[in-house]
Amino acid sequence: MSAQLKAFRCSFLDFVDDPFYVSELESVRYIVDGLLVIENGLVKELGDYESLQAKYVGIEITSYPGMLIMPGFIDTHVHFPQTEAIASYGEQLLEWLHKYIFPTERKFQEFAYAQKVAAIFLDELLKNGTTTALVFAAVYPESVEAFFTEAHRRNLRAIAGKVMMDRNAPDYLVDTPETSYQQSKQLIEKWHKNGRLLYAVTPRFAITSSAEQLSVASRLLDEFPDVYLHTHLSENVDEIAFVKQLFPENEGYLDVYDRAGLVTNRSIFAHGVYLTDAEFARLSEAESAIAFCPTSNLFLGSGLFKIEQAKSKEHPVKLGLGTDIGAGTSFSLLQTAGEAYKVAQLRKQKLSPFQALFLATLGGARALGLEDKIGNFETGKEADFIVIDPECTELLAFRNSEATTTLKELAAKVFTLMIVGSDRTICATYILGNLAYERPN
């Protein structure tokens, strides 16, 4: 038995419900001195150390005194080919794409180069505590092959897809409805459910896909009903105006996707900064999800997302956080959560530390329809988790020197990590109970 079991002693934080709708006492699980038992990569049991230790006598226990263990973070929108374009100066969305991103993505027709960047990208995710991500590749199938090859080697739960774009882009990045269908289908058949990998049909956005190509995307969803749809929506004012010019017969940006059959309970739309009340209601009705990308929205000057409307009781929408590298400015979902708090502040709203961390864990899992597999420490779930060091810098050690026993004290501590933490905050990252990253001393 002992060969199959692993045990970890630490303080633990996860979520058993949504703190936007129920009290923290009902939604937050905090165990000051806990024991997490893992069997064959899955959670077997989590509870108080004192009550469980006798049950697991003889099992070697890995202890992290003074640390905090949480489920691995879930990034619901990010572009791996844009890793090298992070922090590109001076443009808003459409100009930024043409000046920086399209030339960068051209390099990803070469498998070897794409694999090199995929390795760097995935290492950055693990270093920042992200264990699951929904990822844009490039238009070239080689970029998807490279990404999945590297993710499979690391045994990660990752979702990705070939970008579909047949207009309003440089010739070297344009495919056709037919080639995008054939290439996507081949990639789905090879990689979807291969290990822990999943596929997302990925039209870049309505500007770069014709009605014919959006129809092809819908055809793929019909043929493979358990794949995802991943695209952009209502990020930028000029983008929305361009979509209106391209699709004058439609009632709005979301309606372009809706008429194509792309608004489903497997659809994740990045941004949604300028969604109307009717569009929020439609996303709620369809059980679609939004990836909120605050660092990107601020960096490109796109706007301030209406968190309170997405999480309204009348029309709740599944919501996760996205780093959106490379318009996003950090791989860290802790820092992304901190920027989400600032967006809420600018809109005279509140986002509590627990609400923000819910979005980065169980909320993200629900947005991806993976809450039965990841997102918290419920029995039977995949044991992807991170070890957080609340005193990883001199400043944080000074700020967080007091003991933490109550939810109020814990909220104050994790808030400091959201605001002034970094990749140094992540002491270790585990995938299926196996150490995948350890912070250098």
Image: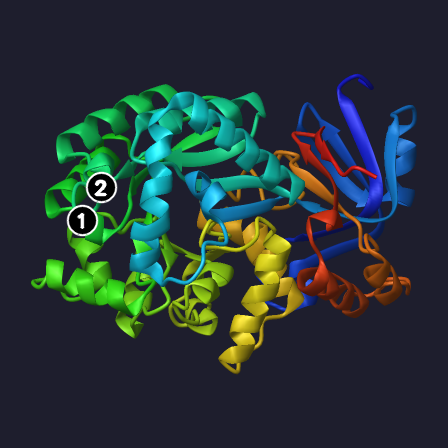
**Residue nearer the viewer, 43 or 352:** 352
Query: Mark 1: which amino acid?
Result: Asn
Residue at mark 1: 168
- Looking at the rendered image, the disc whose residue lies closer to the viewer, 1 or 2, is 1
Tally of marks: 2
Comparing 355 with 84, the one in front is 84
Can the viewer see residue 330? yes
Q: Is residue 383 above or below residue 292?
A: above
Q: Given the image, on which type of amino acid does mark 2 rest?
A: Met
Secondary-structure class at tag 2: loop
**x and y percent of residue 242 in the render?**
18, 62
Q: Quadrant of residue 432?
A: top right
Instruction: Locate the N terminus and report the quarter of the image it occupies.
Output: top right
- Please tell me how crowded label 1 is: few (under 14), some (14-19), or many (20+) other residues with Cα within 10 Å: few
Horizontal and vertical percent for residue 372?
Answer: 53, 40
Residue at 66% in and 66% down: 353
Residue 165 numbered mark, or none:
2
Tell me where residue 298 appears, x and y as whole percent. 47, 66
Label 1 element class: loop
* Residue 436, image x, y percentages: 68, 30
| Residue positioned 79% across, 16% down in the render | 3
In the depicted structure, whether residue 337 falls above or below residue 385: below
User: Could you tell me if residue 188 is visible in this image?
Assistant: no
Closer to the camera in the image, 138 or 129 = 138
- At 71% from the left and 62% from the top, the residue drawn is 420
Asked whether, in this view, residue 256 is left or right of residue 328, the answer is left
Label 1 close to label 2 by CB (< 8 Å)? yes
